[in-house]
Amino acid sequence: MAWSLNFLLNAQESVQLFDPVPANSQAPDLSQTLENYALYTINPTGLNQIHAIGHHSFVVRIPDGDGTERTAYMTPSHIFKPGYKLRSSDGIPHQADPGLHFHGRFAGEQKKTLSLSVYANHAVAIFGSEKGNVVLAPLDNPDGSLQAWHVAYPDLQIAGQMPFECHM
């Protein structure tokens, strides 16, 4: 309880970052891949609000993939050292949006944590639930660019190999 009380004393802003997609929209149908999911768009005002807040605490509603939302108390995480550079495997530096990164807890659930990363035009979140890890991320276009649609889904429902690899 002390964590929430301390946070509430320091929190300045409440942000609406994700908007549910109306049922009559032309949103993509992911039912062939995902059994349980919900689609959202980024609220531009909320995105701008987080960029203006910068490295300060705030409150946000986070979708959990089944059409409901939970209140989360977010605090900044500094995941990059000053002066970091993104380099390809051949050592060439590349420009990248470092984003703003936060960790948080859900209201009334002191043992449930989440991570939220916010970039120029999208956001990514992940948190644990009784349904598995819930992932909230933008959909990719065939050319690799990001769509305006964000999908929230529990990853336990994904069986087998995903159509991509991740190398460290």
Image (spheres, rainbow, N blue to C red):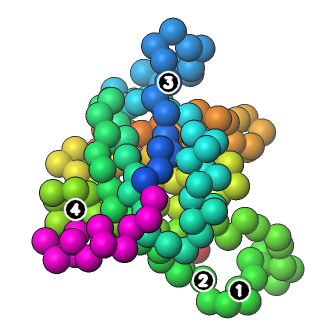
At x 42% / y 39%, what residue is drawn? 152
Amino acid carrying mark 3 in the image:
Val
For label 1, the SS is loop
Earlier-in-chain disc, 3 versus 1? 3
Looking at the rendering, in which quadrant would you find the N terminus? bottom left
CA separation in Å, label 4 and label 3: 26 Å
- Residue 148 spot, x, y in % from top left: 64, 35
- Start-end of magenta stretch: 1-13
Earlier-in-chain disc, 4 versus 3? 3
Earlier-in-chain disc, 2 versus 4? 2
Does the magenta portion include 8?
Answer: yes
At x 16% / y 77%, what residue is drawn? 2
- Residue 153 spot, x, y in % from top left: 38, 39
Does the magenta portion include 158?
Answer: no
At label 1, counting other C-alpha atoms closer than 10 Å, the crowd grade (few under 14, some 14-19, many 20 or more) is few
Amino acid carrying mark 2 in the image:
Phe
CA separation in Å, label 2 and label 4: 24 Å
Q: Which residue bears the numbered disc 4?
A: 112
